[in-house]
Image (tube, helix red, strand yellow):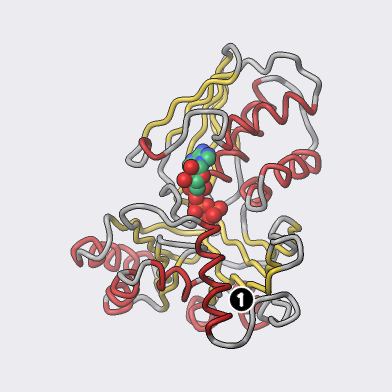
Amino acid sequence: MVTVRVPAKVNVQLGVGGVRPDGYHDLANVFFAVALGDEVTATPGEGVTLTCTGPDADAVPLDDSNLAARAARLLAAHHGLPDPGVHLHIAKAIPVAGGMAGGSADGAAALLACDTLWGLGTPLDTLLDLAAELGSDVPFALLGGVALGRGRGEILEALPVSGTFHWVFAVADGGLSTPAVYRECDRLREESGLGSSAADVPEPDADPALLAALAGGDPVALAAALGNDLQAAAVSLRPSLADTLHAGTEAGALAALVSGSGPTCAFLAKDADAAAHIAAALRASGTCRTAHATHGPVPGAQVVQTSA
Ligand code: ATP
């Protein structure tokens, strides 16, 4: 049995370029791994089977579309294993379809858990390549920490960071579809007259003030530099998110932003006490299903338990 713990992410910067001819958007994506995470346990089995527990377990597909199952099959195929043979149990804490890359996290965790269970010893570079095949957010869940993602987000560069930052995540009822949020972003850009193609929108780049705030461990400077180009689209599709963002700011958050494609909202706090206070205020506000205080950065997917 092998258990892997894997973090969720928040995008402290999500710069979205115009639509490329292949339909993707170029991104300048600064990923930040937080302690809120899932655990994936791999045990020997027949074929690839899945179970899931946690508050959102009903929303997690248990068929071959699950990224953890796809990861197990991909790793087996890469090594030419005829029968993958694994049962994967996902203990799910990351909100589903919440803009925190929960499915991607489980894909990364399953790669590492199966690699360990099957004794394959796949080099990290190869695991990162397989992760990128599974999805653009999967490599970061293996790497963790703070990293700049370019291209579709899958070309990663680890970034220097000091200290610990304190976060609160307000979980909404129901998810938002990531492709729908990108389409809404394009629609809003067309509506504003700016256009939405790669020729219309300047190529996004990492904000030097944000990189300096991370390297210096300065939450006030980081709060001033946070940015998410998908936020307007997520709020347009789910107008009640404006109330959630407002409630966290009223409770003393240094900054509030939609996490990735939403609908989870992220709040930066000055310290752990402030984070606990903001989480309690958000839970009492009636503007979200629940709220969690957490911190980061934390490492990427890690084996936390093995037994025969
Ligand atoms: P991202 O921020 O990467 O766009 P997200 O956090 O918004 O992702 P996920 O939780 O990854 O969204 O779920 C998106 C969809 O992926 C779900 O609605 C579900 O159908 C599918 N999915 C596949 N595998 C998983 C998994 N292991 N956990 C959760 N959802 C999964």
Q: Is residue 280 visible?
A: yes
The residue closer to the viewer here, 10 or 65, is 65
Residue 200 point in image, percent of width and height: 71, 82
Q: Which residue is mark 1?
A: 216
Which residue is depicted at the point 65% across and 52% down? 140
Residue 32 percent coordinates (x, y): 57, 61
Q: Is the C terminus in the top left, top right, bottom left or bottom right quadrant? A: top right
**Mark 1 sits near ligand 1, with its Cβ under 8 Å away:** no
Question: Is 85 on the left-hand or right-hand side of 123?
Answer: left
- Amino acid, disc 1: Gly
Image location of residue 94, percent across then percent down: 44, 47
Compared with 34, 225 (above or below) is below
Q: Is residue 176 above or below residue 96?
A: below
Write down the quadrant of residue 2 in the picture.
Answer: top right
Rendered location of residue 298, percent (x, y)? 56, 53
Which residue is drawn at the image coordinates 47% and 76% (left, top)? 232
Mark 1 secondary-structure assignment: helix
Residue 236 location, quadrant: bottom left
